[in-house]
Amino acid sequence: MAKPFGQSTLGVRAGQRRTDLKEHSEALFLTSSYVFENAAQAAAGFAGGGADFVYSRYTNPTVTMMQDRLAALEGAQACVATASGMSAILATAMVLLKAGDHIVSSNAIFGATVQLFSTLLPKFGIETTFVPLSRIDEWQRAVRPNTRLLFLESPSNPLGEVADLGAVAAVARKAGATLAVDNCLCTPALQRPLALGADLVIHSATKYLDGQGRVLGGAVAGAKGPALDGLVGFLRTAGPSISPFNAWVILKGMETLEIRMLAQSERALAVAQWLEGHPQVARVYYPGLPSHPQHTLAKRQQRAGGAIVSFDVKGGKEAAWKVIDSTQLISITGNLGDVKTTITHPATTTHGRLTPEARAASGIGDGLIRLAVGLEDVEDLKADLSRGLG
Ligand SMILES: Cc1ncc(COP(=O)(O)O)c(C=O)c1O
């Protein structure tokens, strides 16, 4: 057997389908439907489960290229793209679960996912128990006979807590449940959850897969079989499909994913090290720092620490806002996954809807700042942060 291609090669080559026109760069198929030779072929296309190109709600060649490239990078047999990260999570829940089923989820997940699990899914008879990400005993304790899905993000956002993916996968296996990992922060360039025991990998492709903050997209990758087939069926019936244009942007974004993730991680580590030595900084949260309580686990699971660095400044909200408001280069925005560095104050933005008690319980203090480090020069980032840090 030929030696399998490396990650760098897969990032730029996997999934490409050339037409008879022999285009070198991947083509963008902006078409909603496809023509058939005759009525019998049309009937066969409609009867098939999505193997032929029929209608772009669930089959499109550009989307197929994006799915196949991401599957190759994640080491998955198959991948289904969706309109956004949230629709990937919703579609997964709709396909795997029915009324009466139960989810065990990390409590350190994206806010909209918390809302989906705690307000929307209960309307359909699906309950969720939230547990601390790194407490395997709590994952085990929360499992019930009707638990069908375990869900987590690792590292967590914004505090960079890391889950032992193999240990959570063992809990899922024992329970006969599916472990789905939202791999948005690491991407397959840094971490491949399927190789560590997860059953499904979920993506907000809006973030690092695109990498330049242009389009929304999502994806679910895993083994060929009922879950992935069910997702194609869900798209066909319910319609949260990715636009071929967005899929094309993400497909091309994946060509630079590995070098971006490594370069952004390198810059994030340099900024984290500098912040750790700064007299106005009380604490830095970054899994790539040796001082991080789960640094050894992070090093085992991840190729690098990723681009998210959070830190507590001395002086609470006032001091944190001063740092943010004094920036001239870094963008004040809640988004992440961009080559432009962004800065946000989680307590009053992404986590602003939590009660002060719930915020404190999840470790989001008033002095916490989250940086999503991009590709600028580290010295320029330090200079920009120094303005308000004093
Ligand atoms: C970890 C994580 N998962 C899912 C999402 C949702 O993705 P989208 O905005 O593409 O719906 C986000 C968005 O910020 C995220 O950060």
Image (cartoon, rainbow, N blue to C red):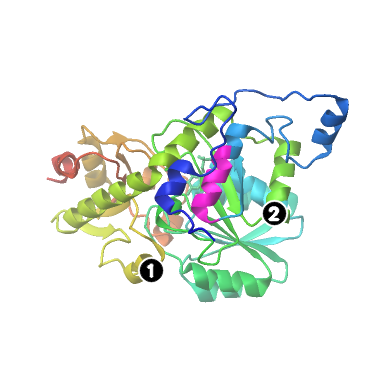
Residue at left offset 49%, top offset 41%? 205
Give the left or right position of residue 182, taking residue 177 as reference.
Answer: left
Residue at left offset 64%, top offset 57%? 223
Q: Which quadrant, please, contains the N terminus?
A: bottom right
Q: Residue furthest front?
A: 1
- Segment tinted magenta in the rendering: 65-75
Residue 226 magenta-highlighted: no
Residue 71 magenta-highlighted: yes
The local secondary structure at tag 2 comes to helix
Q: Look at the image and tell me whether residue 57 can be seen.
A: yes
Residue at left offset 30%, top offset 66%? 292
Q: Look at the image and tell me whether residue 314 can be seen.
A: no
Residue at image mark 1: 300
Residue at image mark 2: 227
Q: Which quadrant, please, contains the C terminus?
A: top left
Please state which of residues 355 and 266 is positioned toward the viewer in this rendering: 266
Residue 57 falls in image quadrant: top right
Q: Amino acid at mark 1?
A: Arg
